[in-house]
Image: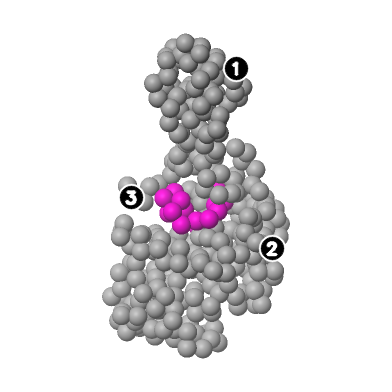
Amino acid sequence: MAAVPDPHPTSNGDPLIRSTGLTKTYGEVTAVRDLDLAVGRGEVYGFLGPNGAGKTTTLRMLLGLIHPTSGSAEVLGRPPGDPEGLVRVGAMVEEPAFYPYLTGRDNLRVITRYAGLSEDGIDEALGTVELLPRADSKFKTYSQGMKQRLGIAAALLKGPDLLILDEPTNGLDPAGMVEMRTLIRHLGTGERTVLLSSHLLAEVQQICDRVGVISKGRLVFEGSVDELRGRAAVAIRAEPLDLARRRAEEVLGPGRVEVRDGELVVDAEPAEVPALNRELVLADVQVSELRPASRSLEEAFLQLTGEGGDDDEG
């Protein structure tokens, strides 16, 4: 699998987010380097990378909160931070901050007044994130999950076409993570696009349509989760192993056969497997097991970034 990102998303229409050569340096430190990103309409896009890989810096540039050192980007067809684009963007970058002694509803009222928005959408936003029963409780009494959901409610007040969420499950317990994943998947239905940054592999695998993997400021992969894991493979337990490997290489080619943990792993389509099995048997190879095998998301992530992925359940 090539590590070069594909700048053409699979979703319909032009990308809602597109960057070309986006770079941000702080003195001698390069936080983001030559980033080519493409996020299409109506998808949940997972921006995956280890902590410190450049995810939040990228989101801040896309929102116009900081300026790139070089390169360019468009968000909803406008430069980052352009008022005509921002009016259609909702965002929660890092942990949301609210007035602790105000209720959830009153905190959203403050935001609508500062932003020049109508208060009519407050209850709808609270209902979407399932906070209406606690809307009139003070923010300081909220659990961490409720605080995160109120942050998303604030991002929804404009009825945005694009929702940008930075590590929305940070600090949540397993039950809160499940609730947040369900909410994000719901928010990404229809025409709305969700750009979700995360370092949690399980999170991205369960809710995202496509992913971009960033490592040390560089985009090292862009595509579906299945593409990230690589094409399907077949594991074959056979004896003698050396003879099985040689015969499989004669049938499929040496670039599609490897020995892993005492068995063959072959890059083969399902339709090729019966013929391969027949050839092995004809070569006096004893085949005791055939099963699907592909590398895990963790293995793919490790190969791309050189780091282990955190499992949110561990």
Question: In the image, which is nearer the foreground, mark 3 or mark 1?
Answer: 1
The numbered disc on residue 14 is 2
- Tell me which numbered mark, 1 or 2, is placed earlier along the sequence: 2
Q: Is residue 71 visible?
A: yes
User: Which callout, 2 or 3, points at the residue further toward the start of the chain?
Assistant: 2
Q: Which residues are drawn in magenta?
A: 197-213
- The type of residue carrying mark 3 is Glu
Residue wearing tag 1 = 250
Q: Is residue 25 visible?
A: no
Q: State how far apart marks 2 and 3 are (Cα).
A: 36 Å
**Where residue 78 sits: x, y (%)?**
69, 70
Q: Amino acid at mark 1?
A: Glu
Q: Name the residue rendered at 40%, 25% in the picture.
A: 289
Residue 39 relative to residue 167: left or right? right
**Residue occupied by mark 3:** 313
Look at label 2 and name its amino acid: Asp
Q: Nearer the viewer, residue 218 or 213?
A: 213
Circle nearer the viewer, 1 or 2: 1
